[in-house]
Amino acid sequence: MSLADWKRQQPDSALIISLGRSPLEELVKTGHQKPILAAVITYQDFREIVKQEATPNALSAIFYDPDPLRQITLGKLLLPLSDAVGVMHSMETPFFIEEYQTITEALDLSLNAIPLKQTTEVAIQFPRLVQKADFIIAQPDPVIYNSQTLPRVLLTSYRQRKVVIGYSTGVVKAGAVATTYTTAEMLIDDLEESAQEILNNETASFTRHSKYYDISYNLEVAHSLGLDIVSKEELEAKIAELYPGT
């Protein structure tokens, strides 16, 4: 059902699964009180929405951007001797790095974060970030990473022999070393299972990245940098070591 149709009909539902930012904004703004499961939304967008409005008690979310814990841990496993991780974000997307400090501390990494006001700063600031960090975590921030900046960013990192953990399989194909990712099929499975648990009162409200994921590599870039590929099992074992019960 489209958002426009939902506004007209206002169907009585035990659970609403909202897809994208606009439907969730509408549900939160109108004070919808029955359970909501938000999907196809980034952590950044979700935080912006719930910060501006009173959050419904029964609001859950599965974020589609890569989990920072998996991304940073993957970078550390690829570069076991690394000491510092770098990230750039625009002034308009500060929530992207909220979890980074805790994760980097657990991995004994220093965090170099550079906030930018506009796209034109990327060409100047990215080379500086490369000098401060052993690997870079890229997030889906269009001010920072877009069709104009991404080729230069990836070329600079390759020339400097620095690892970039991308935010999509497309970025990996373009030259990033690797990323964790969730397919549409994986997300659908997660939504079906989570919706059933909510309807059966088997789980409280939650916010998380999808529990289903895989790892994508650009093998040509990884081999040229002399990296040993990390399996999903190795990544999960390291995360379980850092956060028992995860």
Image (spheres, grey):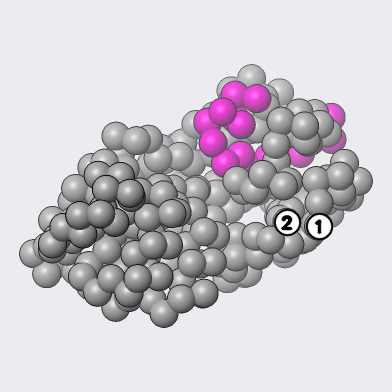
* Mark 2, residue position: 90
Residues drawn in magenta: 158-174
**Looking at the picture, how far across and down is residue 10, in whole percent?**
21, 59
> Do the CB atoms of the residues marked 2 and 1 lie less than 8 Å apart?
yes
Q: Using the rendered image of the protein, determine whether residue 237 is visible from the camera's viewpoint.
A: no
Q: Residue at x 80, y 46 (%)?
A: 119
From the viewer's side, name the closer residue of 82 and 45.
45
Left or right, residue 36 beside residue 220: left
Mark 2: amino acid: Ser
From the viewer's side, name the closer residue of 109 and 137.
137
* Mark 1, residue position: 117
Left or right, residue 188 beside residue 171: left
**Looking at the picture, how far across and down is residue 169, in whole percent?**
53, 31
From the viewer's side, name the closer residue of 51 and 210.
51
Q: Which tag, 2 or 1, sits closer to the chain's start?
A: 2
Q: Work out which quarter of the rendered image holds the N terminus and state it.
A: top left
